[in-house]
Image: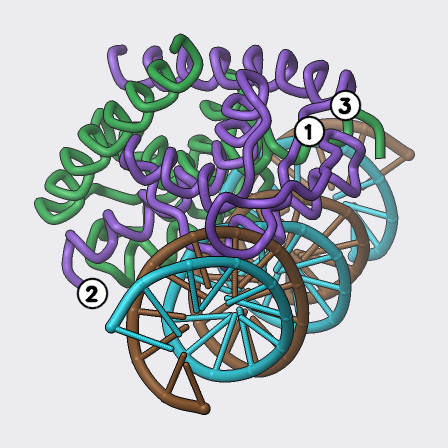
Chain colours: A purple, B green, C cyan, D brown
DNA sequence: TTTTATTACCTTGTATCACAAAGTACATAA
DNA sequence: TTATGTACTTTGTGATACAAGGTAATAAAA
């Protein structure tokens, strides 16, 4: 395995760590549905695929961080709009702290 | 599952993403052995356990990012000192970029 | 001498989860 | 009626963090 393959793998793992955080963050601004969240993450170069995001949304819903409702689409099949709950906002706040702590830890490890 | 359990899980995943990066970073400063790396990570509040770090060091060695040598200890059994290779330093540089990109991505997602 | 403590390394089994790939379903245009 | 685009879902696989337990070397205590 060459260096770039290895780094790709590490990138995947780094993304893995922040994916739930990103999704809660997006939904904290406005309700959205899976395909739209997917596009938004792609724009931000946080590459994810369908097979990742659908189960993740279901998990977060099962944990009570999200709820959803069906809405008709102007074109195509209905969309499952997810909405963040109070519990979700609470979790998001905790993740903000966790993220900042990790960023700081890495900064110290890298600089020293 | 309550909010804190969920956040603990997310923290674990966040750590997961940067663990290889942290280890290469530590070894880029000086050769070290597993138990010592473990202590250093614990001090930095990057909680990891033995069952995580030993296989990880072996993986990185197998990828050619590290080499090792045995050295006698002043007390107790001999230590397996790991040393970063040129390939490891190259990978570390790539991970620096990857990490900064993710930090920036999260900053944009969280601020906007 | 035997036991205990300390340090260090290693392995096995389990659960989680990102991804690839494939499938289902709805709406609209050709 | 077929093709296209959109959207949601599921299955199988591989990677890996962790819990738990094991092995081994050294030195101090009983």
* Circle 3 residue: B4
Mark in front: 1 vs 2: 1
Secondary structure under the numbered disc 1 in the rendered image? helix
Specify few, some or many for label 3: CA neighbours under 10 Å numbering under 14, 14-19, or 20 or more: few
Q: Residue at x 16, y 38 (%)?
A: B94
Q: Residue at x 17, y 45 (%)?
A: B88
Find residue B18 and report its horizontal and vertical position in percent. 40, 34
Quadrant of residue B73 within the rendered picture: top left
Q: Quadrant of the N terminus of chain A?
A: bottom left
Q: CA distance from mark 3 to mark 1?
A: 6 Å
Q: Is residue B57 above or below residue C25?
A: above
> With B73 as the anchor, is A111 left or right in this view?
left
Q: CA distance from mark 1 to mark 2?
A: 32 Å
Q: Tally the numbered discs.
A: 3
Q: Chain of mark 1?
A: B
Q: Is residue A38 above or below residue A77?
A: above
Q: CA distance from mark 2 to mark 3?
A: 38 Å
Secondary structure under the numbered disc 2 in the rendered image? loop
Label of residue B8 in the image: 1
Asked whether disc 3 touches disc 1, contact meaning CB atoms under 8 Å apart, the reply is yes
Find residue B25 and report its horizontal and vertical position in percent. 27, 29
* Circle 2 residue: A1
Secondary structure under the numbered disc 3 in the rendered image? helix
Q: Residue at x 80, y 32 (%)?
A: A64
Marks 1 and 2 share the same chain: no
Q: Quadrant of the C terminus of chain A?
A: top left
Q: Is residue B46 above or below residue A40?
A: above
Q: Chain of mark 3?
A: B
Find residue B103 and report its horizontal and vertical position in percent. 33, 21
Residue closest to the eye, B42 or A50 = A50
């Amino acid at each position: 395995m060459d260096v770039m393959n290895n780094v790709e793998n590490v990138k995947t793992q780094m993304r893995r760590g922040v994916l739930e955080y990103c999704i809660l963050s997006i939904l904290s601004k406005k309700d959205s549905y899976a395909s739209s969240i997917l596009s938004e993450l792609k724009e931000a170069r946080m590459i994810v695929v369908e097979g990742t995001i659908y189960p993740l949304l279901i998990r977060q819903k099962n944990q009570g961080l999200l709820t959803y409702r069906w809405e008709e689409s102007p074109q195509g099949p209905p969309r499952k709009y997810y909405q963040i709950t109070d519990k979700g906002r609470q979790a998001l706040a905790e993740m903000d702290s966790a993220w900042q702590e990790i960023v700081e830890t890495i900064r110290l490890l890298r600089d020293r």
